[in-house]
Image (cartoon, rainbow, N blue to C red):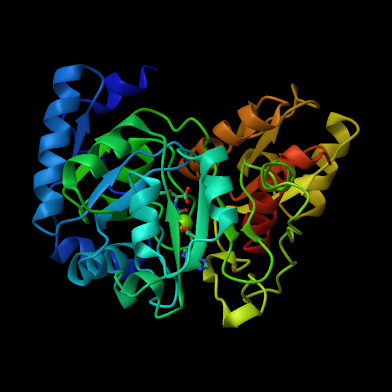
Amino acid sequence: MDFRDADSNPSRRPSIDRSIDPFIHSFIDSNQAVTRILPTHTPRLFADALALAREALFRGEVVAMPTETVYGLAAHALDSEAMSKVFRIKGRPAENPIIVHVESVDRARSLARSWPEAADRLAAAFWPGPLTLVVRHNGRVPDIVTARGATVGIRLPAHPFMREIIRACGFPLGAPSANLSNRVSPTTAGHVLKQLEGRIEWIIDGGPCQVGIESTVVDLSGTNPRILRPGMISLEAIRGALGPGHRVAGREPVAEGGCGGGSEGGLRSPGMMEKHYAPKGRLVVREWETELDLVEQVRDLGHACAETCVVAHTQVPLEAEFLGVSIIPNDAEAFGRALYGQLHRCDEEGASLIVIEKPPAAVEWDAIRDRLHRAAAAG
Ligand code: TXA
Ligand code: MG
């Protein structure tokens, strides 16, 4: 299917995802906005979408837009009222801070109380790109964005639309992933529509996300850099860019319902809670020798094959009557790009069980293992 063709008609309004809980439905029914997808695949369409999004953001409205990692729900980062709409739309708890997206390192520095040398090194190596730097802020970013913490997470994104819109606005954009809180992040405009239809007016369609997994979050506010959320920029790549003078800590394991991020300065990173990034179906990560072995594991889990979707990368089941079987590349980058799309598809098909073939143990799969672990923890 050509993705853009499917979503380019602004008047197209597919049905709302009926599995969303009743509370959200009552909200949608009483606050129904018409949600429109704006395509950007010609220079003219790109310019029109840019002008419209800019105007909406200046008015303090919220616009869903593409980044290279996942789609974001963006608003004026320095406007508390605009940012409070983002929290309401997502159903996001107030204690979870939001990443501020900037157009330059200078802008990032202008929001920071201190800008360590490590920040310069990492920005030079990975910006624009899927890396968020957590630094102490200087009070310019409103409390709602930082969740009243001492730090702010900042990212210079690579997606051309996101970069242009931040430049056109002249102010930074606060943007969490454009999903309902605790649900799977969207990697297409269609995924955003499924979850947020009726809650926002505009979704900018910038095509499928090239990275597909949320940014690596690195805390630079303590004595040593620390990974708060693994992403496709790996711990090794960060160590390499910082050089031998820095001791970079990996992410600590987190307890169910707890927060990661370590204890230095009481730093909170509530997005690290185990239950995040969950599809609706129960998700398990498994290995199997043969197809029969897989079928038996599914039955032992108390599910029928007919209600089970399998996502495999090497041992692909060919005979059993599963609800769905998808093959996803045995390569970390390609897997990362495809993973959330597969989880959205399994949800759409109504799978009660999603079995994902266990990824390899190599370091470049860290972020994928992390997201699968969280998605499995919820089930
Ligand atoms: O790739 C991404 O990072 C995407 C795109 C849209 O940029 N954004 C994203 O935002 O994933 P969100 O809100 O879904 O996840 C942000 C994560 C959360 O785990 C949050 O707790 C953490 O970053 N975070 C944000 N600001 C922080 C801060 N000041 N200190 C610690 N953690 C922070
Ligand atoms: Mg998120």
Nearest the viewer among 189 and 206 is 206
Q: Is residue 202 rendered to the left or right of residue 364?
A: left
Residue pictured at 68% horizontal, 44% vertical: 234
> How far across and down, in percent of the image, does residue 204 sit?
25, 37
> How far across and down, in percent of the image, does residue 227 sit?
65, 58
Can you say whether 130 is above or below 264 in the image?
above
Residue pictured at 78% horizontal, 48% vertical: 299
Res. 358 in view: no
- Image quadrant holding the N terminus, namely top left
Residue pictured at 64% horizontal, 78% vertical: 264
- Image quadrant holding the C terminus, namely bottom right
Can you say whether 307 is above or below 377 in the image?
above
Q: Farthest right residue?
A: 289
Q: Quadrant of residue 143?
A: bottom left
Instruction: Count the numbered circles shown.
Output: 0
Q: Is residue 338 rendered to the left or right of residue 141?
A: right
Can you say whether 210 is above or below 115 in the image?
above
Res. 139 in view: yes
Nearest the viewer among 137 and 93 is 137
Residue pictured at 82% horizontal, 53% vertical: 300
Nearest the viewer among 149 and 191 is 149
> How far across and down, in percent of the image, does residue 211 sit?
53, 34
> How far across and down, in percent of the image, does residue 208 sit?
42, 29
Q: Is residue 96 rendered to the left or right of residue 325?
A: left
